Amino acid sequence: MILWSLEKLWQICHLQISPGSIWNSDYEPFEAEGYVVAGANDGSADENQNPHYQSSTDSPSLIDWNYLVSVTKMILATVATASRRTTY
């Protein structure tokens, strides 16, 4: 039931769900230790999509603000939904 709720929240926030590996993320070590992790990205870590990613040429003008707002809504909605669960 919680998975359906999260999928619905992501749809409301206009985000696509792509379950998969986090093999190249900052939170991979946490998953390796057994923590449940989730991430959201716009693919900008792909150097072909954004050659400025994590470099000195990166700047706030390159931020996709609409995407950032959608991800923020999704995170807040996910935390609110998870906090209503009484059994884990």
Image (cartoon, rainbow, N blue to C red):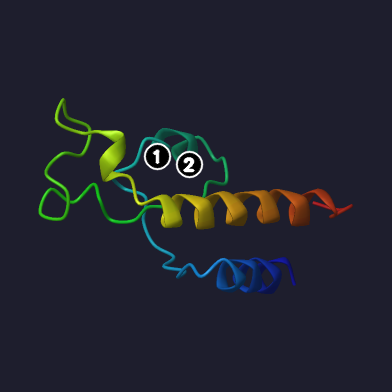
Q: Position of residue 76 (x, y in %)?
A: 66, 49
Q: Please, what is the three-letter code of the amino acid marked with disc 1?
A: Glu
For residue 25, which quarter of the picture? top left
Question: What residue sits 23% from the left and 47% below the top?
Answer: 45
Instruction: Give me the disc on residue 72.
Output: none
Q: Position of residue 44 (x, y in %)?
A: 25, 50
Residue 44, compared with residue 26, is above or below; it is below
On the image, numbered disc 1 is attached to which residue? 28
Instruction: Give me the disc on residue 31.
Output: 2
Question: What residue sits 61% from the left and 54% below the top?
Answer: 73
- Viewed as shown, does residue 53 lie left or right of 5? left
Q: Position of residue 5 (x, y in %)?
A: 70, 70
Q: Is residue 39 visible?
A: no
Q: Position of residue 1 (x, y in %)?
A: 75, 72
10 Å crowding of disc 2: few (<14), some (14-19), many (20+): few
Task: Describe the element under mark 1 as helix, strand or loop.
Answer: helix
Spatial separation of the CA atoms under disc 2 and disc 1: 5 Å
Question: What residue sits 39% from the left and 62% below the top?
Answer: 20
In the orientation shown, which residue stands out farthest toward the front? 61
Q: Please, what is the three-letter code of the amino acid marked with disc 2?
A: Glu
- Viewed as shown, does residue 55 lie left or right of 86? left
Q: Is residue 46 visible?
A: yes
Count of numbered tags: 2
10 Å crowding of disc 1: few (<14), some (14-19), many (20+): some
Task: Describe the element under mark 2 as helix, strand or loop.
Answer: helix
Contact, mark 2 vs mark 1 (Cβ under 8 Å): yes
Question: What residue sits 70% from the left and 48% below the top?
Answer: 79
Front residue of 7 and 1: 7
In the orientation shown, which residue stands out farthest toward the right? 86
Residue 40, compared with residue 12, is above or below; it is above
